[in-house]
Amino acid sequence: MDFAFDTRTEELRERLLAFMDAYVYPAEDVAREQRERLASPWDTPAVVGELKAEARRQGLWNLFLPDGEHGAGHGAGLTNLQYAPLAEITGRSPNLAPTALNCAAPDTGNMEVLAQFGSERQKKQWLEPLLAGEIRSAFAMTEPEVASSDATNVRTSIERDGDEYVVTGRKWYISGAMNPDCAVFIVMGKTDPDGADVRRQQSMILVPRDTPGVEVRRAMRVYGYEDHGHGGHAEVVFDHARVPAWHLIGEEGGGFAIAQARLGPGRIHHCMRLIGMAERAIELMCRRAVSRTAFGRPLAEQGVVRNWIADARVTVEQLRLLVLKTAWLMDTVGNRGAHTEIQAIKIATPRAVVDILDRAVQLYGAGGVSQDFPLAELWAGARTLRLADGPDEVHQRSLARRELSRYA
Ligand SMILES: Cc1cc2nc3c(=O)[nH]c(=O)nc-3n(C[C@H](O)[C@H](O)[C@H](O)COP(=O)(O)OP(=O)(O)OC[C@H]3O[C@@H](n4cnc5c(N)ncnc54)[C@H](O)[C@@H]3O)c2cc1C
C-alpha cells in the first residue's frame, strides 16, 4: 500500500498551499471589513471576486469535478483521491477558499447533478455559468413542516400543467440562497404524490430565482450566526412558481435516485474540508499554548493541554486515512461500492472535529467564543454538519442495516 500522493496531487498541493498563504489567509480580515461596509451583508465582498480571478488564473479551478463519463471536460479531471488533500487545504479557510476555487457547496453538488443528469439545454443555461463561477445556486429539499431526513416525506408539489410545471411548497435552511448571485434552485418535490412506489414520487426541477412566486423570505440562523460567508441558509417559499417543462431534471420520478447520486461526493467533500478545519484548530491550539502563560508557566506545559493536542493529532490522522480510503473506493468501485465507508466518514468526521474545535475553544478561554478568532464560527459550521446532508442517526441506521443484513 502506497500512502504517498501522486506527482499531480503533490504539485497542486504545493500551488494551493502557496495560494492560501499569499491570498486566502490575508483576505479573511479584508472580507470581514468589506462585508461591514456593503449595502447588504449578503452581497459578495470585492475581495472574493479577486480571489476567484487569481485562482482561475493559476489553474486552481473546478478541482472537485472528477474525471470519467460525466465530469470529463468540465473540471480539472482529478480523481476523488487526488482531490481529497486539496479540499482538506481549502477547509482551513472554509468561508473563502472553496468559493475562491469554485469548489464550494452547494454549487459543486448542483454542477455534478447537471453534468450527470442535465439536458444539453440545461447545461448551456446553468452548468456553463456555474463552471465559470458567474452565478451561484442552491439545493432546496428540506421543509419545516416534515421530517426531511426522510426524503419520502417531502411535500412540495411539482405539478404538470400543459408545457409547464407549477412548483408549490416551503423550504428552509437552503444554503447560499441569501446571496443575490444565487440565480437558480434545484428543487426537490413530488410529481406523483400518490404513486405506489414512494421512491418514485419525487422529481427535481430547476427554478430560477426571478420566477414569479419565488420568495426568499428570511435568513435562518446557525447558533445565532447568519453565516454570511456561505450565503446564508434561507427560508424560501414557492407559491405556484411556473417554469417551462424542460426545467425538469431527468425524468419524472427520478428525484430520489438523483439525490442519492448527489449526496455521495458532497458528503466526502464536507469531510475533507472538516479535516482541514481540524488541522487549523490544532495549529491555533499549539500557537496559543506556547504563547500564553497561566500560573507561572506556558499553557503548553500543562498535561491536560498536551493531551488535547495529542488526542487531536491522533484523531485527525485516523479520519484522514478513512477519508482517503473512501475516496479511493469511490474511484475504483464507484459510489455504491463505497456506501459503507461514505456513511462511516459522514458519521465519524463531524463528531470528532466538533470535539477538537471544542477543546480549542476551551484553550482560548473567552477568546475562543469571540469573533476575534475563527474557532467559534468553525465550531458552529462543523456542528451543523452532524445534521446537514442527513443527521448522524440516519447514517448510523443505514450502516447498521447493511452490517446486520449479512447475518439475517
Ligand atoms: C446549516 C445547515 C445547512 C443546510 N443546508 C441545506 C440545504 O442547502 N438544502 C437542504 O435541502 N437542506 C439543508 N439543510 C437541512 C438538513 O439537510 C436537514 O436539517 C436534515 O436533513 C434533517 O432534516 P430535519 O431538519 O427535517 O430533521 P428531522 O428529519 O426532523 O430529524 C430530526 C432528528 O430526528 C432524528 N432522526 C431522524 N431520522 C432518524 C432515524 N431514522 N433514526 C434515528 N433518529 C432519526 C435525528 O436525530 C434527527 O436529527 C441544512 C441544515 C443546516 C443545519
Image (cartoon, grey):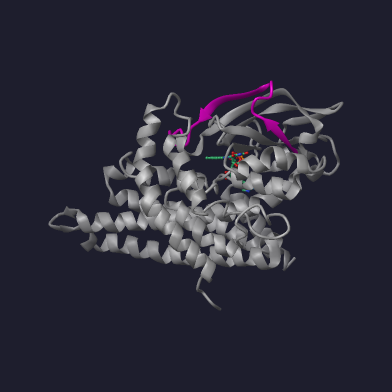
Residue 8 in sight here: yes
Q: Report the magenta residues as a range.
A: 204-226
Could you tell me which residue is drawn at 55 percent across and 29 percent down? Answer: 180
Residue 152 in sight here: no
Position in image of residue 223 (x %, y %): 44, 36
Position in image of residue 96 (x %, y %): 45, 44
Q: Is residue 146 left or right of residue 318?
A: right
- Residue most extreme to the left: 296
- Residue most extreme to the bottom: 1
Quadrant of residue 124 within the rendered picture:
top right
In which quadrant is the C terminus drawn?
A: bottom right
Position in image of residue 3 (x %, y %): 51, 74
Is residue 224 in the magenta section? yes
Could you tell me which residue is drawn at 68 percent across and 55 percent down? Answer: 71
Viewer-closest of 89 and 171: 89
In which quadrant of this rendering is ligand 1 seen?
top right
Could you tell me which residue is drawn at 48 percent across and 65 percent down? Answer: 11
- Residue most extreme to the front: 57
Quadrant of residue 400 within the rendered picture:
bottom right
Position in image of residue 113 (x %, y %): 69, 47
In which quadrant is the N terminus drawn?
A: bottom right
* Above or below, 44 relative to 6: above
Q: Is residue 14 left or right of residue 77?
A: left
Viewer-closest of 280 and 349: 280
